[in-house]
Image (cartoon, rainbow, N blue to C red):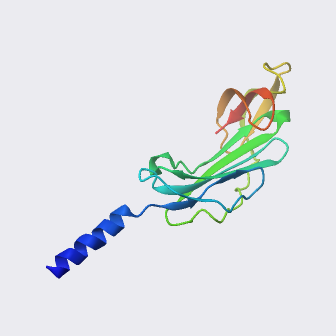
Amino acid sequence: FLKVLFLSFFSCLLLGESLICEICSGAEATCANETQNCLPVLNKCATLQSESIVMIHITNKLCIHSKDCNEDLTVVNMGKGGVMSTKLSCCAGILCNQKVLPLPPINRTLNGKECKGCFGLHKTSCQQEEVVHCTGEQMYCVELYGTASIRNPGTIEAAGN
């Protein structure tokens, strides 16, 4: 009887345990010092890093579901507007996302693909298009519209992977 009671108690402890992740958002390569008990459905810790246009580096740390852990490097080439790279890194374990690894280097070897490009900072439409010469694994032309939370609205037509 004691063995069954012990195993039941131990199983309840294991099932009730939640993941603890570092949670933060910052305009630097790292951010830290805040932790959170993740909801049971969020079973991974993650670090989302973005580096863009004028070397603005943004780091976000969060709890995430494992199905959302697409860890490929995403690169968007905006021609004269610069290059934006984003990487999501996921891990399992208490506070496993404390350490932030540097973003991998961008392959700058021309691959022969060309896209139309335009970058309209502080504008809602593109005024002057250019040809973007794709590099590395940039195989698709994309058109993005949106508002960044740290700057004014802008429009981008670019090459991406």
Question: Residue 157 location in percent, x, y?
Answer: 74, 27
Q: Quadrant of residue 76?
A: top right
Locate residue 113 relative to residue 3 in the image: left or right: right
Front-most of residues 151 and 18: 18
Residue drawn at the location 64% of the way across and 36% of the way down? 139
Locate residue 91 relative to residue 156 in the image: left or right: left
Q: Does 26 appear above or below 21?
A: above
Quick one: which residue is furthest to the bottom in this view?
2
Locate residue 68 relative to residue 141 in the image: left or right: left
Q: Quadrant of residue 22?
A: bottom right
Question: Residue 57 location in percent, x, y?
Answer: 77, 50
Q: Quadrant of residue 84?
A: top right
Question: Residue 119 location in percent, x, y?
Answer: 81, 28
Q: Does 42 appear above or below 19?
A: above
Front-most of residues 90 and 12: 12
Residue drawn at the location 69% of the way across and 43% of the way down? 75
Question: Residue 59 location in percent, x, y?
Answer: 70, 52
Q: Does 70 appear above or below 95?
A: above
Front-most of residues 131 and 42: 42
Quick one: which residue is furthest to the left in this view?
1
Residue drawn at the location 24% of the way across and 74% of the way down? 7
Location of the N terminus by quadrant is: bottom left
Location of the C terminus by quadrant is: top right
Q: How many marks?
A: 0
